[in-house]
Amino acid sequence: MVDIARRDLRALQGMVADDETFSDEVFGFHAQQAVEKALKAWLCLAVGDYPRVHDLEDLFRRLQDAHQEVPVSFLDLIELVDFAVQYRYQASEEEWPLDRDRVCANVAALLESVDARVAEAERRSGR
């Protein structure tokens, strides 16, 4: 999951400055996908499994229910939840308040945090 999330992050990084080629809906979709996969990887570490849902708020809640300390800055990524399905199939008529640089930085920070957790789990298991 983390490797797939990294691919979405690399796509985001390529889209940050090119808003003429990549609409906010496309950017938001890849951002949401990276976050979803990172959270599912984290849930696997915390509880051994993850649900087949796209709702970022639900995934964050499950992490908190598993007594995982979730930095408040990561919770800002919940704003991406509508990009999973709704805006993937339906264009929006409103302007997005997406700050691509901020979103990209938050997604990267989340992935770094999950990477560190994976490395720690592997260290403890002797891998």
Image: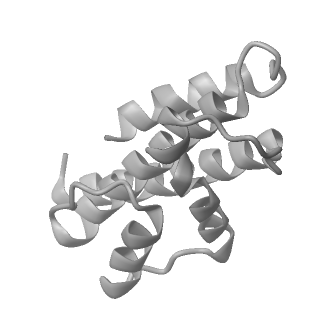
- Residue 6's place in the image compared with 36, above or below, is above
What's the residue at 20%, 71% (across, down)? 47
As drawn, the residue found furthest toward the top would be 21
Relative side of 68 to 127, left or right: right
Relative side of 54 to 121, left or right: right
Of residue 124 and residue 112, the one placed in the foreground of this image is 112
- Percent position of residue 109, x then y: 63, 52
Determine the image quadrant of residue 43.
Answer: bottom left
What's the residue at 27%, 70% (across, down)? 46
- Percent position of residue 69, x then y: 48, 80
- Residue 34's place in the image compared with 126, above or below, is above
Quarter placement of the C terminus? top left
What's the residue at 30%, 82% (across, down)? 66
- Percent position of residue 94, x then y: 79, 46
The colour scheme applied to this rendered structure is one colour
Relative side of 42 to 44, left or right: right
Determine the image quadrant of residue 20.
Answer: top right
Of residue 42 and residue 51, the one placed in the foreground of this image is 51
Determine the image quadrant of residue 58.
Answer: bottom left
Quarter placement of the N terminus? top left
- Percent position of residue 111, x then y: 52, 48
